[in-house]
Image (cartoon, helix red, strand yellow):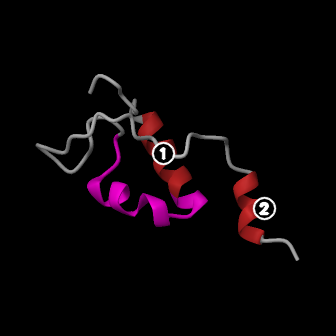
């Protein structure tokens, strides 16, 4: 039997494992200036499904993230 989640994930675009660019800062708001994720998304990234991560990727890319020189 195949894993339907793995099959769905195979249809998603190839992305790095994480949008983190090691410019971490949420000093003045809830959004990281480096990767564009909320602190909640950062905290839960490892437990998020491929589809949940893809939704985050789509949003942050549309907003101009990740930024190496935040």
Dot 1 alpha-carbon crowd within 10 angstroms: few under 14, some 14 to 19, many 20 or more: few
Asked if the residue under mark 2 is in contact with the one under mark 1, i.e. CB atoms within 8 Å, the reply is no
As for residue 44 lying within the magenta part, the answer is yes
Mark 1, residue position: 18
> Which is more toward the observer, 34 or 63?
34
Task: Find residue 16 and report its image quarter.
Answer: top right
Q: Residue at x 51, y 43 (%)?
A: 58
> Quick one: label 2, few (<14), some, or many (20+) residues within 10 Å?
few
Image coordinates of residue 50 in percent, x first then y, are 59, 58
Percent position (x, y) of residue 31? Answer: 25, 46
Name of the residue lying farthest toward the bottom = 1
Mark 1 lies on a secondary structure that is: loop
Q: Which one is nearer the viewer's eye here, 52 or 25? A: 25
| Image position, residue 22 (x, y; %) | 33, 36
Q: Which residue is mark 2?
A: 7
Query: Which residue is at 52% across, 60% downward?
Result: 52
Against 26, residue 63 (above or below) is above
Residue at the extreme front: 22
Q: Where, by quadrant of the figure, is residue 40 drawn?
A: bottom left
Quadrant location, the N terminus: bottom right
Answer with mark 1 or mark 2, whichever residue precedes in sequence: 2
CA gap, disc 1 to disc 2? 20 Å
Magenta stretch in the rendered image? 36-52
């Amino acid at each position: 039997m195949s894993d339907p989640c793995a099959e769905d994930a195979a249809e998603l675009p190839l992305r790095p494992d994480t949008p983190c660019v090691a410019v971490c800062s949420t000093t003045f708001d809830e959004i990281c200036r480096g990767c564009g994720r909320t602190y909640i998304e950062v905290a839960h990234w490892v437990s998020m499904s491929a589809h949940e991560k893809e939704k985050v990727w789509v949003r942050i890319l549309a907003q101009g993230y990740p930024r190496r020189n935040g």
